[in-house]
Image (cartoon, grey):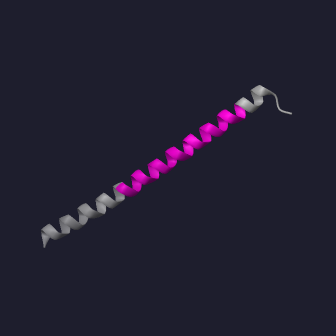
Amino acid sequence: MKNHKEADTESKIAMKKDAIQSSDESIQLYKDEQKNLQEKLQKLNEKQQD
């Protein structure tokens, strides 16, 4: 059986992994949104040039 300190450390590691994964997902959403906005801006610029 694991001691309390070891279990606590594993718990903290798991929470940090979750936080990192959540952060990575947020960054990906931000990048996707940024790409989307750049494409819209490019289309608007093309329409203005026509």
Image-based side of 39 in relation to 20, left or right = left
- Magenta stretch secondary structure, dominant: helix
Compared with residue 28, is residue 11 higher up or lower down, i.e. above or below?
above
Quadrant for the C terminus in the image: bottom left
Image-based side of 3 in relation to 44, left or right = right
Compared with residue 2, is residue 49 higher up or lower down, i.e. above or below?
below
Image-based side of 30 in relation to 5, left or right = left
Q: Residue 36 lies in what quarter of the image?
A: bottom left
Q: Position of residue 44 (x, y in %)?
A: 20, 65
Q: Position of residue 1 (x, y in %)?
A: 86, 33
Q: Position of residue 4 (x, y in %)?
A: 77, 27
Q: Position of residue 25 (x, y in %)?
A: 50, 50
Instruction: Tell me, yes or no, whether the highlighted magenta stretch contains residue 13.
Output: yes
The answer to which of 35 and 5 lies nearer the viewer is 5
In this rendering, the count of numbered labels is 0
Magenta range: 9-33
